Image (cartoon, rainbow, N blue to C red):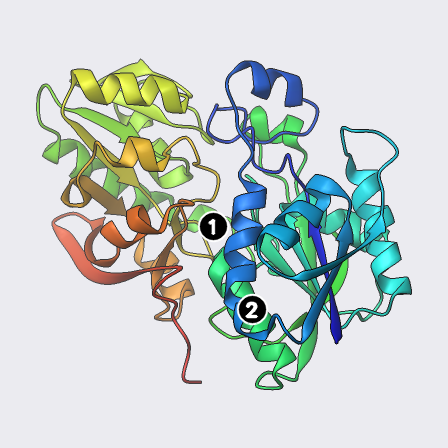
Amino acid sequence: MRNIGLIINPIAGMGGRVGLKGTDGVLEEALLRGAIPSAPDKAMRALGKLLSQKENLRILTGEGELGERISGESGFVTKVVYRPAVTQTSGADTVGLAQALVTEQVELILFAGGDGTARDLVAANVGETPVIGIPAGVKVHSPVFATHPETAGDLAFRYLSGKSKRKRETEVLDISERDYRAGNVVTELFGYLWVPDGVGLLQNRKAPSPASEASAQREIALELIARMEPGVAYLLGPGTTTREISRLLDQPFTLLGIDVILDNKVILTDASEQQLLQLCKEYPCRLVLTPTGGQGFLLGRGNQQLSPEVLETIRPEHMIVIATTGKLAELQHRPLLIDTGDLTTDDAFTGYTRIITGFSSTVVYPISSGSTPYISNS
C-alpha cells in the first residue's frame, strides 16, 4: 500500500465567522462567541476525492482530531504515528506529526489549516516531501494551498496517479494575527515547501493593491455610492477598494472586517456572523465585495463572517463586485473564486457577474467554485 500523510489543525479558521480574524491566541474567546471547528470537515471533503483509490492507500496521521478520526470515518486504512501530549493540540503537535510523517517516508502530506499551519511544516523541516494545503484557516495567503478542499484532493489524486509528476518549491507567507486584527497587513516570507505542480488547482499568492490604483478605487467608490438605494443595508467586505466607499462618505471603516452602510451612515463596524444574520432579518441587504489581489477570491478568504447562513439571506443578484482593471489584469483571465465551506452556497454564487470598474464602467467576469474547478489549458 502507498502511504500518504494527513495533518489537521482542528482549530484552524474558528475565529473567522465570529469576527476575530483568526484563532491564534484567542481560542477561548472564539469558543465563547460560539465558534465551531471547520477544518475537519474540509479535510474530509479533500479525502473524498481519493476514495476511488482507498484500497491502495494508507493514511498515516496523528491521534484523534489531528487526523485519525476523519481518516477512519472516510473509510481509509489508518495508521497513527503521533500522539499529542495534551488534549488541546498546538503548533508543536503539527511539527511533531510532520516530522513523524517524514520519518515514515510518506509520498505526500495533505494538511488542513492556514498560513500558521504551513509555517509549522516549514519548522518541521519536511525537506522535499511534497505537501498540499487544504484551505481551512482565516489567513490563507500562501500558494502552497489548493483553491478549495476538493481541488486539494484532485491534485493529490493527479500526483499519486502520475498525471502530475512534477513538483515545485513555493513560498510560505504569513502575517501577525495581532497586526491583522488591528487592520495592518504586513506579509512575511517564512520559508519554502515543495508542492505538486497543479496549474489552476493551487491558489496564487496574495498581492496588495498598489498605491497607483487610488484614483481608480475612488472612481469605483463614487459610482457605487451613486447607485446606493435608500433603506437598503450595504455590507462592505474587506479591502482597500471597499474602504474607499466609507472614506468618501466620511464614515469609520474596518479594513479587514465587514462594515454595514445604511443611508450613507455606518450602522455596524467589524460585524460578526450573528450580527449580520440579525441585520438581514431587519433590512433588505446588498453585499459589496472586491476580490483578493493576485488570488481572486470573493468569499472564503478573510471574510468568513459571510457564512453560508448569511449568504442564504442575500440573493446572488444582490452581490455587487467592484475591482480595478489592474486587479483583474493580474488574474490573467482566471475566474474569480468562491470557497464558503458549503458547495450548495458556492454553486449559487457561481456563473458570471458584472464588475464595476469605474465611472459607468463594468465588465462581465466568470466566478468558479470548488465543484466547478478551473483548469488552465496552458
| Image spot of residue 289 (x, y percent) | 31, 41
Query: To which quarter of the image does residue 368 belong?
Result: bottom left
The amino acid beneath tag 1 is Pro
Whether 33 is drawn above or below 203: the answer is above
Q: Secondary structure at mark 1?
A: loop
Q: Secondary structure at mark 2?
A: helix
Whether 240 is drawn above or below 364: the answer is above
| Image spot of residue 142 (x, y percent) | 62, 54
The amino acid beneath tag 2 is Leu
Q: Can the viewer see residue 332 in this picture?
A: yes
* Residue at x 46% of width, y 29% of height: 17
Which class describes the residues within 10 Å of circle 2: few (<14), some (14-19), or many (20+)?
many
Quick one: quadrant of the N terminus? Answer: bottom right
Q: Which residue is mark 2?
A: 50
Whether 46 is drawn above or below 87: the answer is below
Left-right relation of 251 to 204: left
Q: Which residue is mark 1?
A: 210
* Residue at x 65% of width, y 23% of height: 27
Asked whether 346 or 60 is in front, the reply is 60
Which class describes the residues within 10 Å of circle 1: few (<14), some (14-19), or many (20+)?
few
CB atoms of marks 2 and 1 within 8 Å: no
